[in-house]
């Protein structure tokens, strides 16, 4: 591993209790702000393409299957990168791993905006997917080292709202740029923003508390659940031994991973195709269609906080019951978009708000549950593993889902969405009374 990315070594604790409290209070907010901003901007360089897709499709005279190919390539590569990136990030310094990844994705977005051929765009978007995989694993490392088990649901949810803010702003920004200056500027401007933000992350972020002369967060907060997990994690196992013992043979991880396939079929399916559905079926313009995606993200912002808080307070850290409740909510709200005669913009926006409210809870809670049933020091590996499966599901929303829409119209699309929501909930029922 390149030394530039190597995790900072632990330093002895020499500070007084008062100094430790003061440092923790400052750095926890500082680190949360850093990863929140960083991951929000990762969404700028990831969702820029989705936001300008209808305009690009028209300009380049492409078919739905053409843009479906780009989406499928992205999600297959991104899912693989999330897994590999999770393994690497557990041993890396998050400030550089995340910052450099964001800089590179910004550069690729600019190159994408200057290209036209399907081959060139497919290669660039595949490269973007690889470096997008450097975004979330460092967030996981920060969340599991700076926040303890009995509070993590809330703070994980706070960080997860960066998805929603980034995802809410970029459709409006890229859509506006595409309408007034052409779709290429809808890629180039987010790329520039990504480069600037990546440089800032490399300057302001830090590593785990022990690298700064602070005790582990479980010791500082006297969190018994956290201390027990840390105690179990103290071993001399190699990475392969940890993977084999705590990931590959962990039945809870596998159930979560398979469920995650279906969660992402719905989440990415709605997110990627909703603006196309509204443009073609409801006759709205691109900016209005992208505004519905913004409502999806606003709903997700609120729903994410409710899901994280509820799993902490209502179910005492058990993420599964809240996960199932939200999955059933997805099924009902997607069904409403499909079956109800929604004609006004307010009605459409309200339904997209509800879909967003429910859809981001399972996306967050499944990854969190995976981190908490695995080896403490390999949370990035565990979330990367289930993330790999999630993005295999996302890959199915590219070319395969485009073919479903082309052959069965939008009815087939909504049948897939509602069935996937129900099955994802059924799959994790056995975990309710299992290991937390």
Image (cartoon, grey):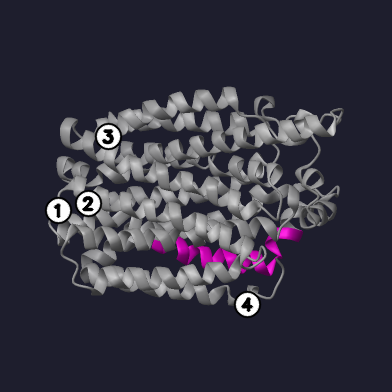
Q: Which residue is mark 3?
A: 186
**Magenta span has 248?**
yes
Q: Position of residue 323 (x, y in %)?
A: 54, 67
Chain-order first, disc 4 or disc 2: 2
Query: Do we see residue 289 in this rendering?
Result: yes
Q: Which residues are magenta?
A: 245-266
Chain-order first, disc 4 or disc 3: 3
Chain-order first, disc 2 or disc 3: 3
Q: Which residue is mark 1?
A: 284
Residue at image point 25% right, 32% down: 184
Q: Secondary structure at mark 4?
A: helix
Question: Could you tell me if the residues under marks 2 and 1 are in contact, i.e. CB atoms within 8 Å?
Answer: yes
Residue at image point 58% right, 73% down: 428
Q: Is residue 271 above or below residue 335?
A: above
Q: Which residue is mark 4?
A: 430
Chain-order first, disc 4 or disc 1: 1
> In the figure, is residue 166 to the left or right of 145?
left
Chain-order first, disc 1 or disc 3: 3
Question: Could you tell me if the residues under marks 4 and 1 are in contact, i.e. CB atoms within 8 Å?
Answer: no
Q: Name the quarter where the C terminus is drawn.
A: bottom right
Q: CA distance from mark 2 to mark 1?
A: 6 Å
User: Closer to us: mark 4 or mark 2?
Assistant: 2
> In the figure, is residue 262 to the left or right of 256?
left
Residue at image point 80% right, 32% down: 18
Q: Is residue 179 above or below residue 303?
A: above
Q: CA distance from mark 4 to mark 1?
A: 43 Å
Q: CA distance from mark 2 to mark 3?
A: 16 Å
Q: Position of residue 353 (x, y in %)?
A: 34, 58
């Amino acid at each position: 591993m390149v030394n530039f990315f190597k995790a900072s070594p632990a330093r002895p604790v020499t500070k007084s209790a008062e100094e430790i409290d003061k440092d923790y209070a400052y750095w926890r907010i500082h680190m949360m702000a850093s990863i929140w901003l960083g991951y929000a901007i990762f969404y700028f360089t990831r969702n820029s393409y989705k936001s300008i897709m209808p305009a690009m499709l028209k300009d380049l005279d492409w078919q739905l299957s053409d843009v479906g190919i780009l989406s499928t390539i992205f999600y297959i590569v991104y899912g693989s990168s999330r897994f590999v990136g999770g393994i690497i990030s557990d041993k890396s310094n998050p400030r550089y791993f995340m910052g450099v990844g964001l800089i590179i994705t910004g550069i690729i977005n600019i190159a994408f905006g200057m290209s036209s051929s399907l081959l060139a765009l497919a290669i660039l978007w595949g490269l973007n997917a690889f470096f997008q995989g450097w975004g979330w694993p460092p967030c996981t490392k920060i969340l599991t080292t700076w926040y303890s088990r009995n509070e993590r649901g809330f703070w994980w949810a706070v960080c997860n709202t960066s998805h929603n803010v980034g995802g809410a702003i970029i459709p409006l920004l890229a859509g506006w740029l595409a309408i007034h200056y052409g779709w290429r500027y809808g890629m180039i401007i987010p790329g520039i923003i990504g480069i600037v933000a990546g440089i800032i992350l490399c300057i302001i972020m830090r590593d785990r508390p022990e690298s700064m002369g602070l005790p582990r967060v479980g010791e500082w907060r006297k969190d018994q659940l956290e201390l027990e997990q840390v105690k179990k994690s103290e071993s001399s196992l190699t990475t392969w031994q940890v993977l084999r013992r705590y990931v590959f043979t962990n039945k809870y991880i596998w159930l979560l991973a398979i469920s995650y396939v279906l969660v992402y079929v719905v989440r990415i399916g709605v997110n990627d195709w909703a603006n196309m559905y509204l443009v073609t079926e409801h006759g709205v313009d691109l900016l209005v269609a992208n505004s519905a995606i913004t409502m999806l993200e606003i709903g997700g912002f609120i729903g994410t906080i409710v899901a994280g808080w509820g799993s902490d307070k209502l179910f005492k850290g058990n993420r599964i019951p809240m996960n199932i409740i939200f999955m059933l909510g997805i099924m009902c709200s997607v069904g409403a978009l499909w079956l109800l005669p929604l004609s006004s913009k307010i009605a459409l926006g309200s339904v997209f708000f509800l879909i967003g409210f429910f859809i981001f809870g399972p996306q967050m809670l499944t990854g969190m549950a995976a981190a908490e049933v695995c080896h403490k020091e390999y949370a990035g590996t565990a979330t990367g593993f289930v993330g790999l499966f999630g993005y295999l599901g996302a890959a199915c929303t590219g070319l395969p889902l485009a073919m479903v829409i082309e052959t069965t119209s939008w009815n087939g699309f909504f049948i897939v969405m509602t069935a996937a929501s129900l099955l994802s909930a059924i799959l994790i029922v056995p975990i309710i009374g299992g290991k937390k």
